[in-house]
Image (cartoon, grey):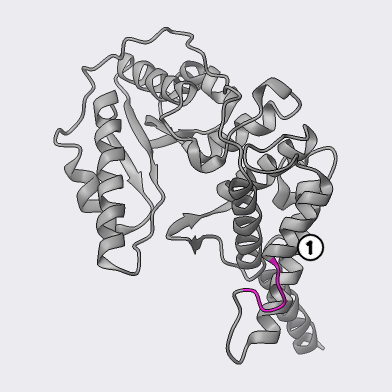
């Protein structure tokens, strides 16, 4: 029988973990905390609630009470039924210097030791470089006997707490443009600022920028978030040269401008699209062009 570990990475699923595990009981080895997609889902589901406006995405992890409750609830439900409870992903990619890699490794170990202390049986990393340190934080084969002392129905809704900063807004825009550019070139994961950015982090960035704009959030170290401010940030993050260099400079600039235009439409569309890549992102454009080219060649061959 095929068995798999199923990700619990949406706010509705966080309330239905036990039901999901029951329905999948013949094929479930366990459940997995999908922290990044869960943050996106929190924002998306509660986007119209002014009392649930999220903090800078970089400040949200299992350190927040509702995220910790989500992880502990998953562990309790899994272990109560003899299933494994997997932790979340450490999203680092190895830095360019030894000092940076050592600092990253320290943070990975700290994160994984915290997950082990909660009762998780295993975890994820985004790069093989960190597998050894992450595994060392889990000295036991599993922790099935640990049942966290948490309410069956703990508070799972996010709190509207600081920080909300201009740097957070800039990072949302910068990461979104960079990932959108990669997506347009058929690249599904992008190493950015020594972190692995994927579709989940694009969607967090898009949804959070939309939510801050929707509620005209007043930043702690800057002005209120308006269309004018968002436009200014996009212009700052898309200068004439940008991060492009070398003989492919014109091509790179064009790709970044196109990515910036697509992504800006995604953060300013109203209402918020459920999933951006299905509406404002051109899904797998290069692959589709290749498929069309092959189809045209096949037609010519037949003739």
Q: Residue at x 47, y 60 (%)?
A: 193
Q: In this picture, is 134 found above or below 22?
A: below
Can the viewer see residue 282 in this picture? no
Q: Is residue 130 above or below residue 161?
A: below
In the visual, does 238 lie left or right of 128? right
**Residue depicted at x 30% and y 68%:** 97
Q: Nearer the viewer, residue 172 or 161?
A: 161
Q: Which residue is mark 1?
A: 261
Residue placed at 72% from the left, 34% from the top? 217
Which image quadrant for residue 94?
A: bottom left
In which quarter of the view is residue 127 placed? bottom left
* x then y, percent, for residue 46: 69, 26
Look at the numbered disc 1 and give the secondary structure of its residue: helix
User: Among all residues in the image, which is located at the extreme left?
Assistant: 139
Q: Is residue 38 visible?
A: yes
Asked whether 262 or 160 is in front, the reply is 160
Which of these two is toward me, 212 or 123?
212
Residue that protrudes farthest toward the bottom in the picture:
247
Q: Is residue 79 above or below residue 172?
A: above
Q: Residue at x 24, y 26 (%)?
A: 117
Q: Position of residue 164 (x, y in %)?
A: 61, 37
| Quadrant of the rendering where the C terminus is positioned | bottom right
Packing grade of label 1 (10 A; few <14, some 14-19, many >=20) is some
Q: Quadrant of the N terminus?
A: top left
Residue 280 in picture, x, y percent from top left? 78, 54
By secondary structure, the bulk of the magenta-drawn segment is best described as loop
- The image shows residue 64 at horizontal and vertical percentages of 46, 26
Q: Is residue 155 magenta?
A: no
**Span of residues in magenta:** 238-242
Q: Look at the picture and state if 248 lies above or below 63.
A: below
Count all numbered tags in the image, as a single digit.
1
């Amino acid at each position: 029988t095929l068995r798999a570990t199923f990700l619990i990475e949406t706010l509705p699923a966080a309330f239905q973990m036990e039901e999901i595990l029951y329905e999948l009981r013949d094929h479930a080895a366990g459940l997995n905390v999908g922290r990044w997609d869960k943050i996106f889902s929190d924002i998306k589901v509660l986007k119209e609630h002014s009392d649930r406006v999220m903090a800078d995405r970089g400040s949200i992890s299992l350190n927040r009470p509702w995220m910790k409750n989500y992880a502990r609830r998953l562990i309790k439900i899994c272990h109560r039924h003899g299933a494994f409870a997997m932790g979340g992903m450490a999203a680092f990619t190895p830095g360019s210097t030894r000092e940076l890699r050592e600092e990253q490794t320290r943070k990975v170990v700290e994160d994984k030791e915290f997950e082990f202390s909660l009762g998780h049986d295993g975890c994820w990393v985004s790069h093989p470089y960190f597998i050894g340190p992450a595994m060392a934080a889990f000295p036991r084969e599993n922790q099935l006997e640990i049942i966290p002392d948490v309410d069956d129905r703990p508070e799972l809704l996010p709190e509207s707490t600081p920080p909300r900063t201009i740097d957070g807004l800039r990072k949302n825009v910068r990461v979104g443009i960079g990932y959108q550019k990669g997506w347009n070139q058929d690249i599904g994961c992008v190493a950015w600022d020594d972190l692995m950015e994927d579709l989940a982090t694009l969607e967090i960035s898009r949804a959070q920028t939309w939510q801050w704009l929707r509620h005209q959030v007043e930043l702690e170290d800057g002005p209120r978030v308006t269309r004018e401010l968002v436009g200014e940030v996009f212009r700052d993050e898309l200068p004439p040269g940008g991060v492009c260099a070398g003989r492919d400079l014109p091509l790179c600039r064009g790709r970044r401008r196109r990515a910036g235009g697509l992504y800006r439409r995604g953060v300013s569309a109203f209402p918020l699209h459920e999933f951006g890549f299905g509406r404002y992102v051109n899904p797998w454009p290069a692959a589709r062009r290749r498929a069309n080219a092959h189809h045209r060649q096949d037609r010519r061959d037949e003739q």
